[in-house]
Image: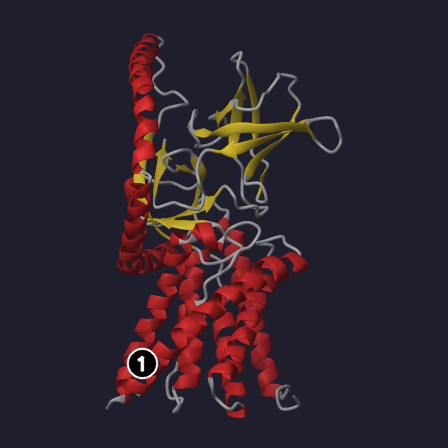
């Protein structure tokens, strides 16, 4: 032990500690700026991302194969269920098409060119997930060249899963909605109840033990029931309106009894992601 | 002449392990990060420990490669620099210090690997805590992260020990 704390070693240890802490605080400080990451960091990420594709491809292939096998096993039951749904869907689809067309026409008459709900979908593969228990992050295979910008919302096939936190030229990092770090900024969402009135709020947290999204500090007296649909409200920032988040699981008073807290079952499964869609506005 | 092959195989294996960590974490996310437990794959660390203890001449620049792998990890996976960049070389240093004192066999290597896993996980946890990247308490960390992480990685160690040893015996 005496040898360990000889002068030279002690100096080296201290220098290493200072450099390491310095690097960390600088990168944490610049992480939340709009212009980040710096060019050099982008370049490194692009190079590593290109190499990672070589490894990610066979692993994703294997995952796809095992998914197909398990799909095949429930094909019959699923087919029965889906057939029933398809009949209803055809009708809904026609309805939606008519409504969209009408909506477009009406907007043209009102000279409303852009609306909150407009976006283009950019589909990307999931390259990898950060192997850490502290960061629920994904790296996806599209970046600035595909029009992705920081803070854009990311969806799986079924619903919202997170937002873009770092954009490089050919890949970008996505922070999942289950990330509870204090720096994660939150989505503006709204609940629409059976009678059509809406309640606005923001995502305030994620309860990992029950896998529910929390929407806190709701002071509205509008009645919200279990099963009401939750979508993004499009207020403030780059998130378009109308991205599906999930359904209401429960409503309860918060600890002080003044406001209520809405718990939301997310529509997307956060643990099985191979392809995601970025809503580019 | 034959020794130089290890100098090529080691970095390739290191980066393969680095990328497999991420890819497998995503592929098995449902099992590895099932609440409340989160088990982190540490194939990179496994590869480094194997290299230190199975390469009997100690001529591989493991420390430098570990620092490089740590840098790439910070750069590509987390975006927070200076954490794995220091944690991985630290483990190399400690392992090198321990090595002459040990009678090398499967069990002692297993023990060293457990110690190294604990050091890396604790180091990363403390560093992120200082940098305010995370908020979590020590008990949760020990029970829900460190425990499962060690369990999963020990299983991988047991599976991979003999194949990797064979590889090293063949190459060096």
In the orientation shown, which residue stands out farthest toward the front?
Answer: A76
Q: A18 above or below B140?
A: below
Element type where label 1 sits in the image = helix
Residue at left offset 39%, top offset 73%: B160
Q: Position of residue A62 (x, y in %)?
A: 29, 54
Other residues around mark 1 within 10 Å, as few (<14) / some (14–19) / many (≥20): few
Residue at left offset 62%, top offset 91%: A3
Residue at left offset 46%, top offset 46%: A175
Q: Is residue A11 left or right of residue A34?
A: right
Residue at left offset 43%, top offset 83%: B52
In the orientation shown, which residue stands out farthest toward the right?
Answer: A256
Given the image, what chain letter belongs to the residue carrying mark 1? B
Q: Position of residue B110 (x, y in %)?
A: 50, 78
Q: Is residue A211 left or right of residue A127?
A: right
Q: Nearer the viewer, residue A209 or A23?
A: A209
Q: Position of residue B134 (x, y in %)?
A: 59, 53
User: Can you identify the residue that label 1 sits on?
Assistant: B167
User: How many circles with numbers are drawn on the protein?
Assistant: 1
Whether residue A38 can be seen here: no
- How is the protein colored in the picture? secondary structure
Q: Nearer the viewer, residue A140 or A30?
A: A140
Q: Quadrant of the N terminus of chain B?
A: bottom left
Q: Is residue A3 left or right of residue A68?
A: right
When asked about the image quadrant of residue B19, the answer is bottom left
Q: Quadrant of the C terminus of chain B?
A: bottom left
Q: Position of residue B126 (x, y in %)?
A: 61, 63
Q: B76 above or below A36?
A: below
């Amino acid at each position: 032990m005496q040898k360990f704390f000889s002068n030279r070693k002690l100096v080296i240890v201290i220098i290493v500690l200072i450099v390491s802490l310095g690097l960390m605080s600088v990168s944490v400080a610049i992480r939340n700026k709009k212009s980040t990451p710096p060019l050099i960091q982008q370049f490194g990420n692009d190079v590593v991302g290109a190499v990672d594709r070589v490894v990610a491809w066979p692993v994703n292939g294997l995952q796809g194969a095992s998914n197909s096998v398990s799909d095949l096993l429930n094909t019959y039951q699923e087919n029965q269920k889906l057939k029933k749904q398809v009949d209803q869907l055809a009708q809904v689809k026609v309805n939606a098409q008519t409504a969209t067309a009408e909506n477009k026409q009406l907007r043209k008459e009102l000279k409303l060119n852009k609306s909150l709900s407009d976006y283009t979908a950019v589909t990307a593969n999931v390259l990898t997930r950060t192997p850490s228990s502290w960061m629920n992050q994904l790296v996806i295979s599209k970046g600035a060249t595909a029009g992705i910008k920081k803070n854009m919302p990311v969806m799986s096939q079924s619903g919202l899963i997170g937002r873009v936190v770092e954009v490089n030229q050919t890949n970008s990092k996505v922070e999942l909605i289950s990330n509870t770090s204090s720096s994660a900024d939150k989505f503006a969402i709204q609940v629409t109840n059976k009678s059509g009135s809406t309640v606005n709020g923001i995502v305030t947290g994620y309860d990992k033990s029950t896998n529910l999204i929390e929407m806190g500090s709701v002071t509205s007296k509008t009645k919200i029931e279990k099963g009401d649909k939750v979508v993004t409200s499009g207020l403030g920032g780059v998130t378009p309106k109308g991205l599906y988040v999930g359904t209401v699981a429960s409503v309860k008073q918060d600890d002080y009894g003044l406001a209520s807290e809405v718990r939301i079952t997310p529509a997307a499964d956060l643990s099985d992601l191979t392809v995601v869609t970025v809503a580019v506005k | 002449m034959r020794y130089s092959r290890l100098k090529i195989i080691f970095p390739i294996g290191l980066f393969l392990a680095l990328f497999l960590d991420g890819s497998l974490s995503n592929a098995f996310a449902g099992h590895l990060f099932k609440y409340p437990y989160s088990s982190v794959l540490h194939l990179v660390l496994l590869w480094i420990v194997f290299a230190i203890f199975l390469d009997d001449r100690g001529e591989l620049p493991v420390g430098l490669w570990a620092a490089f792998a740590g840098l790439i990890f910070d750069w590509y996976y987390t975006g927070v620099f200076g954490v794995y960049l220091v944690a991985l070389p630290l483990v190399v240093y400690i392992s090198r210090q321990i090595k002459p004192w040990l009678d090398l066999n499967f069990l002692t290597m297993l023990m060293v690997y457990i110690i190294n896993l604990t050091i890396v996980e604790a180091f990363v946890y403390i560093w992120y805590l200082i940098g305010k990247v995370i908020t979590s308490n020590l008990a949760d960390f020990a029970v829900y992260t460190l425990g499962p992480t060690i369990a999963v990685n020990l299983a991988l160690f047991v599976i991979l020990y003999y194949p990797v040893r064979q590889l090293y015996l063949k190459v060096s």
